[in-house]
Amino acid sequence: MKIVVIGGSGRIGEKLVYNLRQDDFRVLEASPSFGVNTVTGEGLEAALTGANVVVDVSNSPSLEGDAPLRFFETSGRNLLAAGRAAGVGHHVALSVVGTDRMTASSYFRAKKIQEDLIKASTLPYTILRSTPFFEVISAVAQEGTSSDVVISPAWVRPIAAEDLAQALADTATGDPLNRTIEVAGPERFRFDYLATEVLTAYEDPRRIISDPHALYFGAELDDQSLEPGPAALIATLRFEDWLRDTLQPEAVAPRAHKQRRA
């Protein structure tokens, strides 16, 4: 089985490629750094030749203005057309839990368009929506240079990037579901609490300011914005364990376990 990972050089893509190769699948990393550009079409036909599965974990290089819309619409159309021409049997895409509840954000409107293009295509597919992963929350908490960091207090069930990569690997090597499924972390936290824990762990003296109007990728969150449904797959790695492992980079984290149902 040949699996092409679009965005294979990214944070999730690298972990996904590693996991699939551990199971002896033939995996092609596809991204501009590997000579495959889904926006221009460069290298796309050759990359998908003989592919059984395509997993799209790519992201817009810019989150500003209309850039996400241009990226996801153009990339999505090109990738689906190339997939049909190559006879791909399963198109898997990574999306975000709550995408259709956060359309005030240009980023999430673009992700919704990506999802709709996949559903309207003739390719067998599975869309995997994920809650935010710990690494993104950590980056949000640590970005900027101001004395205060403003964060939403909305509820979130964050997931480790490694657990998300394993959920994608399980999805990619399974049968197409022709529907959207969700994956989430095992614990529920307030966003601002997680940010405070991250800054404390890194001995960052800045304050976390809880503000319900703080934006997340351009969207104002409420307590339901990032909530998965009752059928979501539940990952295993807890926030406390992830944070401890992150602070000890010399330790090799074990491979993620299979997810369980909520």
Image (tube, rainbow, N blue to C red):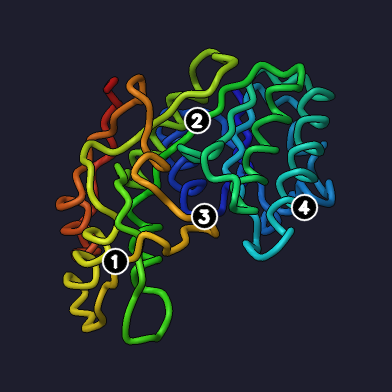
Residue 10 position within the rendered picture, expressed as x and y whole percent measured from the top left = 53, 54
Question: Which SS class for mark 1?
Answer: strand
Q: Amino acid at mark 4?
A: Arg
The residue singled out by tag 3 in the image is 219
Label 3, label 1: how far apart the Cα atoms are: 15 Å
The residue singled out by tag 2 in the image is 128
Of callouts 3 and 4, which one flags the residue occurring earlier in the amino acid sequence? 4
Numbered circle sitting on residue 210: 1
Q: Amino acid at mark 3?
A: Ala
- Residue 142 falls in which quadrant of the image? bottom left
Label 3, label 2: how far apart the Cα atoms are: 21 Å
Label 2, label 1: how far apart the Cα atoms are: 30 Å
**From the viewer's perspective, is 1 left or right of 12?**
right
Quarter of the figure that contains the C terminus:
top left
Label 3, label 4: how far apart the Cα atoms are: 19 Å
Pair 2/1: label in front: 1
Of callouts 3 and 1, which one flags the residue occurring earlier in the amino acid sequence? 1
Numbered circle sitting on residue 92: none
Quarter of the figure that contains the N terminus:
top right
- Give whichever of 8, 67 is nearer the camera: 67
Question: Which SS class for mark 2?
Answer: strand
Question: Residue at coordinates 66% horizontally, 16% vertically from top-left?
Answer: 124
The residue singled out by tag 4 in the image is 70
Question: Which SS class for mark 3?
Answer: strand
Residue 92 position within the rendered picture, expressed as x and y whole percent measured from the top left = 59, 28
Q: Is residue 159 among the parts visible in the rendering?
A: yes
Of callouts 4 and 2, which one flags the residue occurring earlier in the amino acid sequence? 4
